[in-house]
Image: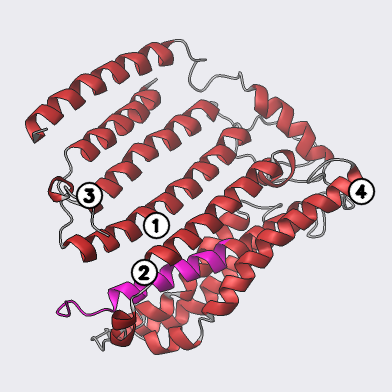
């Protein structure tokens, strides 16, 4: 149960970080923190007490943890990494065009 | 909206989400319990197809179509970042390596670790169906290991040994070949991305049918894509600060 609590906490603290952010890189990192909550949640769902890693032998007797959620976590990490790359690229362009990385100072669109 | 108002609004929303999450968590199956329906289905399927690594079996066999989507996300992100970080003509002239001081021991460690890391990356990709790992993980190890050259302070060497054009081609080719492998499954096996190759002996390198093939394709795609991404970010970092 504590595991689910940690997942929810990470999601919420990441979201609060995005809202209170004063620097675009901080915003991007906060998004990564929020996404880390989903990793913890997925791995927590798949966890089983005294079960092994999902690398099996032909006549597997010992239970293993759920590989499906681990594969979904992998998907999650890929999405997170690519989104982070895109957002950091955007941040670089914003910093060049507007000369600021404070989201509150970004009022007008500029080509 | 002021920061204070925004914070209060966010706190109210966070409280609502927290209540929703707690009510959902209370109705979830017990943590660490034995009820895992997908595991019970994935385990016999993986053993029937001679894939010891269940996660690879899920990624490259049972849910291989999802992995095609993931791969497309990586390709799209690389294309997006390439267009976002395109240096303007004025900037292009300023991109030049800066000479900084690198401690000799860091240099030595970088050069020593470079071949080890590259070998490890290839090993993780190739044995993705047998041991922990797979195309995504091995690809990241390969791409970051390559950049030990940068850590060791030899950006010119990295630039020479980093064929960006070829990495872009390799990324596109690996993505395309994944679709070709899927179509081959459609023609031979009657389903897109069906596992049609011989299953082989459980636990040997040439086994598990199409799983290692798709894993290696993903490994190439991720490694090439990351090299291109990092090259663009490094290129941005080398534009000198004092220039407008």
Q: Is residue B230 left or right of residue A33?
A: right
CB contact under 8 Å: marks 1 and 2: yes
The reply to whether residue B98 is visible in this rendering is yes
Q: Residue at x 44, y 83 (%)?
A: B158
Mark 1 vs mark 4, CA separation in Å: 38 Å
Q: Is residue A26 left or right of residue B34?
A: left
Q: Position of residue A37 (x, y in %)?
A: 38, 34
Q: Residue at x 54, y 81 (%)?
A: B163
CB contact under 8 Å: marks 2 and 4: no
Label annotation for residue A85: 1
Magenta region includes residue B79? no
Label 2 sits on residue? B233
Mark 1 vs mark 2, CA separation in Å: 9 Å
Secondary structure of the residue carrying numbered label 1: helix
Secondary structure of the residue carrying numbered label 4: helix
Q: For mark 3, does the 10 Å Cα neighbourhood hold few (<14), some (14 to 19), or many (20 or more) residues? A: some
**Stretch in magenta:** B222-244
Label 3 sits on residue? A26
Mark 3 vs mark 2, CA separation in Å: 18 Å
**In front here: B146 or B178?**
B178
Q: Earlier in the sequence, mark 2 or mark 4?
A: 4
Label annotation for residue B188: 4
Vertical arrangement, residue A110 with respect to residue A7, above or below: below
Mark 3 vs mark 4, CA separation in Å: 50 Å
Q: Earlier in the sequence, mark 3 or mark 1?
A: 3
């Amino acid at each position: 149960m504590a595991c689910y609590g940690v997942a929810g906490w990470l999601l919420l603290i990441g979201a609060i970080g995005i809202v209170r952010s004063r620097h675009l890189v901080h915003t991007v990192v906060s998004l990564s923190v929020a996404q880390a909550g989903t990793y913890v949640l997925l791995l927590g769902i798949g966890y089983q007490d005294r079960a092994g890693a999902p690398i099996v032998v032909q006549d597997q007797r010992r239970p293993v943890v759920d590989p499906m959620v681990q594969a979904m976590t992998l998907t999650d990490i890929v999405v997170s990494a690519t989104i982070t790359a895109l957002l950091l690229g955007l941040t670089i362009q914003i910093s060049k065009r507007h000369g600021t990385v404070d989201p509150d100072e970004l009022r007008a669109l500029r080509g | 909206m002021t920061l204070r108002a925004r914070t209060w609004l966010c706190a109210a929303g966070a409280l609502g989400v927290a209540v929703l999450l707690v009510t959902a968590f209370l109705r979830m199956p017990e943590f660490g319990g034995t009820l895992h329906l997908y595991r019970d289905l994935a385990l016999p399927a993986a053993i029937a197809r001679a894939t010891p690594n269940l996660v690879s079996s899920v990624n490259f066999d049972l849910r291989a179509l999802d992995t095609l989507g993931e791969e497309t996300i990586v390709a799209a992100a690389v294309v997006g970042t390439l267009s976002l970080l395109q240096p303007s003509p004025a900037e292009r002239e300023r991109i030049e390596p800066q000479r900084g001081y690198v401690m000799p021991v860091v240099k030595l460690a970088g050069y020593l670790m470079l071949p080890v890391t590259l070998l490890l990356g290839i090993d993780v990709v190739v044995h993705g169906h047998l041991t922990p790992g797979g195309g995504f993980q091995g690809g990241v190890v390969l791409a970051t290991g390559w950049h030990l050259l940068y850590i060791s302070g030899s950006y010119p060497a990295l630039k020479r040994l980093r064929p960006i054009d070829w990495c872009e081609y390799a990324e596109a080719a690996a993505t395309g070949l994944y679709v070709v492998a899927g179509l081959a499954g459609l023609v031979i096996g009657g389903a897109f991305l069906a596992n049609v190759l011989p299953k082989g002996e459980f636990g040997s390198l040439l086994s598990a049918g199409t799983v290692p093939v798709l894993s290696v394709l993903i490994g190439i795609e991720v490694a090439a894509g990351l090299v291109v991404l990092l090259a663009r970010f490094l290129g941005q970092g080398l534009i000198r600060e004092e220039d407008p």
